[in-house]
Image: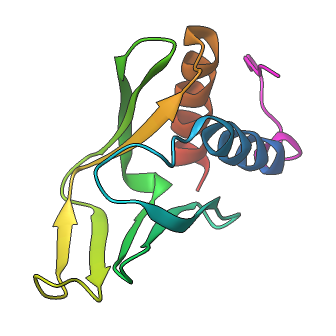
Amino acid sequence: MCFLFSAYSDDTIPQNFRWAESYVKSCFDATAGNQKLKKWELSITDKGFFRFRKYYINGKQEYFSFNLKRFDHLTYLGTEEFGQIVLRTKQDDIIVQTYNDPKGNIDSMAHELKIPVINVHVELLDSLNINLSYLMKEN
C-alpha cells in the first residue's frame, strides 16, 4: 500500500498515522544488532508522538519518543534488502531512556533515531517521509 497524497483533509490525518506506523512495523528488523530482543513496540499516536520501545532478553529496555512537530527529515542507509531508516529531529528532541541496563539507567536526548529494517522499497520510503512531514505540520 502506497500513499502519495497531493491534498489532505482532516479525514486523512488518522489514516496517515496508521499507515506510517504500519509501514515501519512491517519492515522493522528485530534480529538486527548484537543483542536479542524479547519484544518491541512501535506506535505513532493520534496526538503526534512517535514511540519506540525495545525489550531485550537480558531485561534491558530502551525507549525513544518524540513529537512529530519536531521531525525534520528522514534518510535511509542501506539497500532494499536491509538497512536503517534514520529519523532526524530539528534539535535534540528525541527522548532516550534505558532501564535495567548493566551500565546504568540513562536519560538523554538525541537528534536521530535509527530503526533497522528489511525488505524496503524506495517509493514507500518516500511516502513515509511525505506522511511524517505532513503530520509534523498538522500536529
Indicate yes or no whether the magenta region holds residue 9. yes
**Side of 70 relative to 122 (left or right):** left
Measuring from the top left, give residue 136's x and y in whole percent. 51, 46
- For this orientation, the residue located farthest to the left is 103
Spot occupied by residue 32 in the image (x, y as percentages of width and height): 40, 43
Task: State the image coordinates of residue 133 (x, y, percent, origin top left).
Answer: 51, 35
50 on left or right of 99: right
Above or below: residue 12 compared with residue 91: above
- Residue located 71% across and 49% down the image: 17
Instruction: From the viewer's side, name the closer residue of 11 and 61.
Output: 61
- Which residue is rendered at x = 55% and y = 39% of the image? 132
Magenta stretch containing residue 59, yes or no? no
| Residue 91 screen position, x and y as percent | 19, 52
The magenta-colored residue range is 1-13
Which of the pair 12/3 is nearer the observer?
3
Quarter of the image with the N terminus is top right
Residue at image coords 64%, 67% = 47
